[in-house]
């Protein structure tokens, strides 16, 4: 009985500290059953986001659930597609727009938006996180 309890506790602790990465390793994007929302689990760790390239369909409501694994990071994304018109309507429309979302170590934030316009939307870390900070970036690609 003690061995079973130890194995169970080890599995539970591993799952908690992995931040649900087991489920996100199987699929980084999943549809929420009760809403038409595409949920994408993202991790921020040591100068990179995983996944760094995220594909969604135009018109989709998206939730990026971003977890900082090693220390504080940030998340900033362009609202206009690369090379697109920056004077008209925004291509990504956010539920709670912010210039920079702060992500504390071990915490998960949710960034929610509707992907209105096809294109590539670069994102980056907006909280200095060390020597590789400037290379910590990725992109959301909105496909037709």
Image (cartoon, helix red, strand yellow):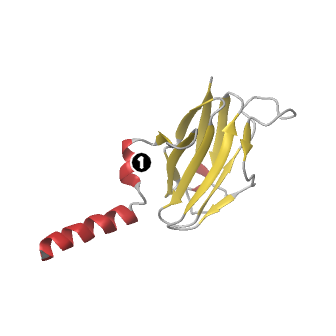
Q: Is residue 95 above or below residue 56?
A: below
Please state the total of marks drawn on the protein image: 1
Inspect this view and state whether residue 136 appears: no
- Quadrant into which the N terminus falls: bottom left
Inspect this view and state whether residue 68 appears: yes
At numbered mark 1, what does the secondary structure look like: helix, strand or loop?
helix
Q: Position of residue 121 (x, y in %)?
A: 66, 37
Residue found at x 75% / y 36%: 80
Q: Quadrant of residue 59?
A: top right
Residue found at x 68% / y 39%: 114
Residue found at x 49% / y 49%: 41
Q: Position of residue 112 (x, y in %)?
A: 65, 48
Judged from this view, the residue extending furthest toward the front is 34
Q: Is residue 85 above or below residue 22?
A: above
- Quadrant into which the C terminus falls: top right
Judged from this view, the residue extending furthest toward the top is 144
Q: Quadrant of residue 15?
A: bottom left
Within 10 Å of the Cα at label 1, are there few (<14), some (14-19), or many (20+) other Cα atoms? some
Question: Which residue is identified by label 1?
Answer: 24
Q: Is residue 52 above or below residue 43?
A: above
Q: Is residue 23 above or below residue 7?
A: above
Q: Position of residue 48 (x, y in %)?
A: 51, 51
Compared across the picture, whether 50 is left or right of 130 comes to left
Judged from this view, the residue extending furthest toward the right is 87
Judged from this view, the residue extending furthest toward the bottom is 2
- For the residue pair 16 and 70, the one nearer the viewer reads as 16
Q: Position of residue 140 (x, y in %)?
A: 60, 38
Compared across the picture, whether 127 is left or right of 32 comes to right
- For the residue pair 36 and 7, the one nearer the viewer reads as 36
Compared across the picture, whether 50 is left or right of 93 comes to left
Residue found at x 52% / y 58%: 67
């Amino acid at each position: 009985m003690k061995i079973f309890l130890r194995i169970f506790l080890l599995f539970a602790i591993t799952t908690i500290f992995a931040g649900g990465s087991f489920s996100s390793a199987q699929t980084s994007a999943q549809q929420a059953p009760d809403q038409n929302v595409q949920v994408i689990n993202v991790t921020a760790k040591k100068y990179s986001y995983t996944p760094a390239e995220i594909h969604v369909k135009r018109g989709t409501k998206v939730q990026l659930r971003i977890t900082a694994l090693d220390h504080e990071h940030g998340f900033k994304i362009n609202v206009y597609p690369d090379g697109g018109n920056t004077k008209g309507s925004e291509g990504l429309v956010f539920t709670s727009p912010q210039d920079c979302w702060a992500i504390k170590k071990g915490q998960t934030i949710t960034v929610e938006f509707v992907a209105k316009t096809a294109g590539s939307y670069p994102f980056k870390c907006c909280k200095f996180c060390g020597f590789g900070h400037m290379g910590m970036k990725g992109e959301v690609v909105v496909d037709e």
